Image (cartoon, rainbow, N blue to C red):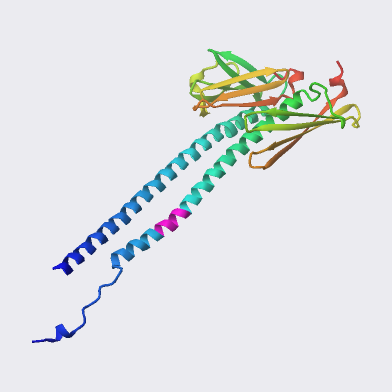
Amino acid sequence: MMDQTMLRPPKKRGVFSPVLIEMTIIILFFALSTSVVIRLIAVASTTARQSAYESQAILAMESVAEQVKANPVGDGFCNECGARVFSVEVTDTLSVDCVVTSDDSPLQGTLYDIELTVTSPEGNVYALDAARYVPDAEEAP
Amino acid sequence: MSGNSAAGNRGEVRGVFIFALLATFALLSLIVVVVGARSYRMINASAEQTFVSRTGLSYLIGKVRGADAAGELEIRNENGMDVLALGQEIDGERYLTYIYCDGSQVREYFAQADLAFSPDYGEKIFEASSLRIVLVDGLLGIEIVDAGGETHTASLYLQTAKEGGA
């Protein structure tokens, strides 16, 4: 007694069930979005750190510029080029390099040119220029 | 019978696999949230510090520069607090802007010069635990300790120091 159903070949079940495929797609999508989010977080973190460093560097350079303006002659020690070169260490990673050159050519005074630079640990260079004119009458004791 | 048992085993393995995938999904989600939250906290703290060091100090420097005129700047000590008094004249009337720190906030108080200084009326500028102001040879030094205990300093050369600016 063989009926129609017995003659039919056994129905093969798919190797991957729909739930499994759905889960795999979800995981793949998650992995993709996670990689984007992680990259964004890393970039945001780096930008915040750089911004904080930059802000600290600018403030440090402004302070050193003001200190030099208050006393442009300093210890009076100049190198062979006639420039006063020194470095001010603000923190372990922040040091302000300063070059002060004096120009006697203006009449009745001296123009001090102050060049300040900070090199970040990443190699970025921040620079600030300042100047102060000191009349001869002010320099004379 | 053995065919049914094999099918059952396969079903169990599939169930375990789906559960493992879901668990991985949950774990990764948690890690991403934790990393994101930590990064957000770090960025926030950094922004807060930058606000005090950059915005706060710049504000004070700007105020001092604005008052850098002969006889308009004075450092007082009121109730153990360093108080920076910046003078200005409006319609023939003399006014003073007092900048000071009450222990938790840097405040600014604007009043007529003949009125007594009262720290209670000051407007809040930013949070800080201390503010020190010193003036040596025309160089004004400002030192702020923020709420987190970090110290921020700035120097300012007063153009009118030699003319009795302070």
Residue A87 in picture, x, y percent from top left: 73, 29
On the picture, is B3 further left or further right than B30?
left
Residue sitting at the far left: A1
Q: Nearer the viewer, residue A139 or A123?
A: A123
Q: Position of residue A17 (x, y in %)?
A: 28, 67
- Is residue B90 found left or right of B137 in the rendered image? left
Residue B143 shown left or right of residue B118 in the figure: right
Residue A67 appears in the picture as rendered: yes
Q: Which residue corresponds to the image point at 17% horizontal and 85% vertical from the top-left?
A: A7
Residue A98: in magenta span: no
- Quadrant of the snapshot with the C terminus of chain B: top right
The reply, left or right, for residue A106 in relation to residue A98 is right
Q: Which quadrant: the N terminus of chain B?
A: bottom left
* Spot occupied by residue A35 in the image (x, y as percentages of width and height): 46, 54
Counting from the top left corner in percent of width and height, residue A100 is at 80, 30
**The magenta stretch spans which residues?**
A29-35
Question: Can residue A33 be found in the magenta stretch?
Answer: yes
Name above or below for residue B15 compared with residue A4.
Answer: above
Residue B94 in view, yes or no: no
Q: Nearer the viewer, residue B35 or A58?
A: B35
- The image shows a total of numbered marks equal to 0
* Dominant SS in magenta: helix
